Image (cartoon, helix red, strand yellow):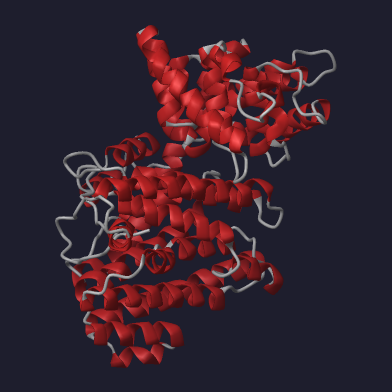
Amino acid sequence: MPSSAAQNWCVRKDLNLVSKYQSENFSRAPKRLTKEDLKQSRNMAVVKRELKASNNVGSDSYKGLIIIDALQRLGIDYHFKDEIEQVLQRQYMANSPPFLKNKDLYFASLCFRLLRQQHFYVPADAFDKFMNKERKLEKRLIRGESTEALMSLYEASQLRIKGEDVLDEAESFSCQLLEERIKFLNHHEAQTVRNTIAHPCHRSFARFTKNNFIKDAIYGKAGFGKALQELAYLDTAFMQAIHRRELNEFSRWWNDLRLAHELKMARSQPLKWFTWSMAMLTDPSLSEERIELTKAISLIYVIDDIFDVYGTIDDLTLFTKAVNRWDIAAIEQLPDYMKKCFRTLHEMTNEIGYKVYNKHGFNPVDYLAKAWARLCTAFLEEAKWFASGHLPGADEYLTTGIASSGVHVALVHMFFLIGDGSTKEQAQIVRFDTCLISYHVAALLRLWDDLGSAKDENQDGKDGSYIACYMKEHEEASVENGREQVSKMISETWKCLNKECLFSRQYSETFIRGSLNLARMVPLMYTYDDSQSLPLLEEYTYKQLL
C-alpha cells in the first residue's frame, strides 16, 4: 500500500486537517432521531414500495433495474439488500436461458451488469444479438444505438473476464463511439459521457461519483428522483459524522504512540491511512473494524519507511528475523527506533487478535504474524536489490512487489476483523499462497504505483519500478512502451479479479466488496497531477468527511 514513488500528500497537510477534525464541533457523534431521520424513513418506505411494485408480474421490467442502478450509484443500496436480491432473482429467472436474447442494447447491458455484480452467472453470449457470424461485435448495429445505450454497454464491459473477447471489443468500440459523439452533445450530456468513461461504476466508488450521478439526473427515470436524492444526502451526512468520530479516535491512538516523534523522516499521515479503511469497509456498523484496520495500515507505512529510509541491511535483517520469530524478546538485538516499532507491532497485533477472539471466537494472531513476516521479508529483498544496485527481471520484481505492496496484510486483517475466519479451515483461504483476490488486488496496486513518478519531499529512499525492469529486458522499449505494457497488465488483472470476486463462493460479500473497494481506491492514491499532488484522493477525502 505504501508507494514506491512516494507521494506529495496534502489535503492541507494531513496532520493539520486531523487537528481540525478533532475539534469538538467537527468530530461530534451522529445526532439522535430527528425530523430529518423520519423523512429518511419515509423515503426508504417509498423506495421499498417501488422496488416491490416493479417485481410484480406484468410490471415494467426496466423500472426495477433502473431503481437498483440508481441506488448503487448513490451508495445507498445497502439499505435495500433483500428487495434488490428479489428483483434481480426474478430478472435472472425471466431471462435465462437464453440470456437477454430479445432485449435492446441498453436493457441487455444494464441487466448483464447488475446480475454479474450480484454474483449471478450471466455468460457473454447475452450479447449474441449484437454479434455477427464471426462472433464479432456487429458494429453497424452498435453505431445506430443511442448514447445512453453505448454508455450502458461500456459500463457492462467493465465486468468482463479473460476469454470474453466480445466484451473487450465492446469496451473499445463503445468508448470510441462515445468520444466521437461528445462534440455533438450539449455541455451537460458531454460531461455525463466523460464521467462515464473516466469513472465506470464497477471500478469507481459510488460515494465518490454520486454527485456526478445526481447532476446527470439519470435517477429521474425512476419517477421519484427527489426521494432518492434526499435519501442520498441524508445517508452522506450520517456516514460523514461516523467517519469523523472514527478518525478522531484513530488519531488519538496514533498520537499517543509517538512513533512520529521517534521516526521523524517517516510519514505521519493518519488521515490518508484512515481513507483506505473508510473506502474498504463502507457498512456504517463496522466502526471498530475500520479503526483497527487503520492501525494495521499505519504500521505498513511506518515499516516501509524503516526499510526504505532508515535501516542498514544488517539492521533490517535483524528486524525481519525478529518479525519472523514473533518473539518480543528479540527486540534486545535491535536499534532503539526498531525496538519501539516492533513492540508496537507486536502489541497491536495481539490486541486485534484478542478483539477478534472476543467477538468471533477465533484468535488469528498466528495468521496475522505470518502476514507481517512475509511483508518484511519482501521489504528486505527489495532493500538488498537497491543497496547492491541490482535491477531484477520484470517477473521477479512484480512477484516481490506484490508481497511488499501491503495489500495482503490489509486484507488478512479485514478478513478476520469482519469475522470470516472463525475456524482454522476458513482461515486457510486467506493465506498469501491461496488468496487470489489478494494477489490480483496487490498486482493492481503495484502496477498503478509504478505508473506514478512523484517523489515525496520527506523521502530519500529509492525504489525500482516494473517499467525500468521491463525496459531492461526489452532494450528497444521506451518509457512510453513500458507504460503501455503496464496499462495492458492492469486491464488483464482486472479481468482476473472480476473472475475471483464475481464467481467465487468461498468469500463473504463483505470481504469481496472490501477487496474490490481497495482496488478501486488504488487509482485515487496513485494518480498525480503536474505538481505531484493527488487531486482525486483529496476530492474523495473531502467528500467523505465534509
Question: In the figure, 320 relative to 125: above or below?
Answer: below
Q: Would residue 271 appear left or right of 283 to someone viewing this image?
A: left
Question: In the figure, 340 relative to 240: above or below?
Answer: below
| Count of labels in the image | 0
Question: What residue do we see at 57% from left, 15% from top?
Answer: 140
Residue 459 appears in view: yes
Residue 226 appears in view: no
Residue 524, image x, y percentages: 36, 43
Question: What residue do we see at 83% from left, 31% from top?
Answer: 97
Q: Would residue 73 appear left or right of 462 to someone viewing this image?
A: right
Which is more toward the observer, 539 or 532? Answer: 532
Using the rendered view, name the quadrant where residue 394 is placed.
bottom left
Question: In the figure, 165 relative to 357: above or below?
Answer: above
Which is more toward the observer, 144 or 119? Answer: 144
Q: Would residue 182 appear left or right of 90 to someone viewing this image?
A: left
Can you say which quadrant of the picture contains the C terminus? Answer: top left
Residue 102, image x, y percentages: 76, 18
Which is more toward the observer, 521 or 448? Answer: 448
Question: In the figure, 46 relative to 275: above or below?
Answer: above
Question: What residue do we see at 64% from left, 61% from top?
Answer: 420
Question: What residue do we see at 38% from left, 57% from top?
Answer: 446
Residue 266, image x, y percentages: 22, 65
Which is more toward the observer, 36 or 462? Answer: 462
Using the rendered view, name the quadrant where residue 462 is placed.
bottom left
Residue 152, image x, y percentages: 56, 23
Can you say which quadrant of the picture contains the N terminus? Answer: bottom left
